[in-house]
Amino acid sequence: MIALAVWTLLAAQEAVAPVAAFPQNLAEWRAGDREARWVQLERETLARGWRNAEAIAAFLEAEGEVELLEWLCLYPRTEGEFGRFSGVLAKLDAPQWARAVEWNLRDTDSHTFQGAAAAFTVGRPAPSLDWLARYATSVHPKAKAALEELRAREGLVAEDSSRWLPPLAEDEALAHLVAPGEVLDFGNARFAAPGATYLHQVERELRAIAHQQLFHEPWLGRVLELTRHARPEVRSFAWIALGEAQRGRIAPSRLPDSALAAVIDDASEDPRVRRAAAMALSQRAEWNPRAWSELHRLALEPAHAAWSVAVDRLRDVGDEMTIELLDELLPELPDDAAARLARSTVDALRARGAIARGSITRTLERTAFVDLACTSLETRRKQWTQAQFAREASDAGVKVELDELASTYATAEDLREALGLAPQLAEFGARVREWGRRLADGK
């Protein structure tokens, strides 16, 4: 996962602001309701990241803002601050503490869910034993594991936890995704209108979907529906959330590469949405050769709305051929900003070094795909692959790996499903083995 930094892709941001007191205007803070205060927190973190996290936590503690502290645990913009905010909830003995901790056991960031488990088993074991036993039938399986650990602890006596709220149900934590209908801008309002749904509410709950990897029904269907929402901002945030799905979380039949490509290339679509779809597709490029090939196609079209996204993401999934292609593209770029982006990607790839050699299987999967699919990269990729491995001909380790690929490679089932049933791709596994054999033989 890209730590949800991609959420800032669509935000109109100035240069990162310096650390400052929080809030800058106490009267303004106190004049609004909880949603208005949340919007101030969101603007603060977009402007300064979490460099003011300590000051924010101290202020919210002094103000007794337990609901906002819980939201900071439920709807993080990035990983890394759960322990800080849940710790303040614990200091305040807030009724929300246990359910905020239990919710974060679902998080895919190891530091977050390990920290949540420790909050139960190390931080407050006696009341946690009571609370986890009280709600044993409704908590997450990782919470049940914490309960068993506490039950096995010699001498630990449960302490009453009735002051703590029950676990959060998903439809409670994600209430604004159930049937959002019209989605409004909150702007500089001081109070949320009764029954209204706001853009920032949809965004924060989509972040929770991504953090917790809640790509099961009904949430997957609802996020897919949001990709067709009337507001381009909502469509954008939905695509970004879908892009955060880890490999295997969404069946290819539910979200094929072609659905993303259609949005990316839809000239009538809002450019923000096209960029968001490109970001989502790029998340598959590490293991899916079609997504990888599409990123290169976009990178070679400087006028495309998603060009900058493709070039930026290639710093993570490109290889030595990417360096060559971007070097050749530099004279054609329309302005200095585009050239700087391309150069920074090239520099990052060069700094990684020996990329193709580092994952020979992935390299040959990409070559086999463009070979069979006859993409615009086909001729260049085949020539590059042969030249790349000709330079490795004397390396015994590379020869061993190529021989093994030639005899044992089998396409992973999820990759087979992702590539689909197009007739020209039916021999994908055989073509990878063929490339392994050809290169091992020095051909």
Image (cartoon, rainbow, N blue to C red):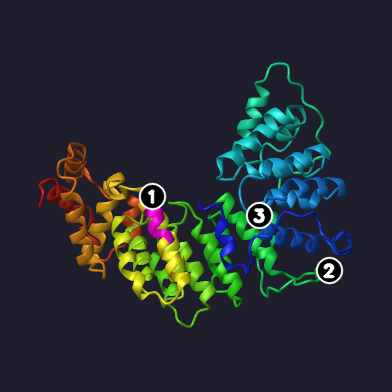
**SS for callout 3:** loop
Q: Main secondary structure of the magenta part?
A: helix
Q: Earlier in the sequence, mark 3 or mark 2?
A: 3
Q: Which contiguous range is marked in magenta?
A: 344-349
Mark 2–mark 1 Cα distance, whole angstroms, equals: 49 Å
Specify the label residue 96 is tagged with. none
Disc 3 residue type? Gly
Q: CA distance from mark 3 to mark 1?
A: 27 Å
Q: Tags 3 and 1 in contact by the CB under 8 Å rule?
A: no
Left or right, 81 with reference to 4: right
- Label 1 sits on a secondary structure element that is helix
- Secondary structure, mark 2, is loop
In the rendered image, residue 57, in percent from the top left (x then y), is placed at 77, 46
In this picture, residue 19 sits left or right of residue 424: right
Q: Residues within 10 Å of mark 3 (few under 14, many from 20)?
A: some
The residue to which callout 1 is attached is 351
Viewer-closest of 415 and 298: 298
Return the disc, 3 or 1, that comes first in the chain's sequence: 3
Amino acid type at mark 1: Ala
Percent position (x, y) of residue 114? 60, 36
Three-letter code for the amino acid on which mark 2 is drawn: Arg
Q: Nearer the viewer, residue 279 or 328?
A: 328
The residue wearing badge 2 is 190
Q: Nearer the viewer, mark 3 or mark 1?
A: 1
Which residue is the extreme one toward the bottom?
268
Please state the horizontal and vertical placement of residue 98, each as a whole percent of the image: 74, 40
Which residue is at 62% across, 54% downward?
208
Disc 2: CA contacts within 10 A as few (<14), some (14-19) or many (>=20)? some
For label 3, the residue is: 49
Residue 252 covered by magenta stretch: no
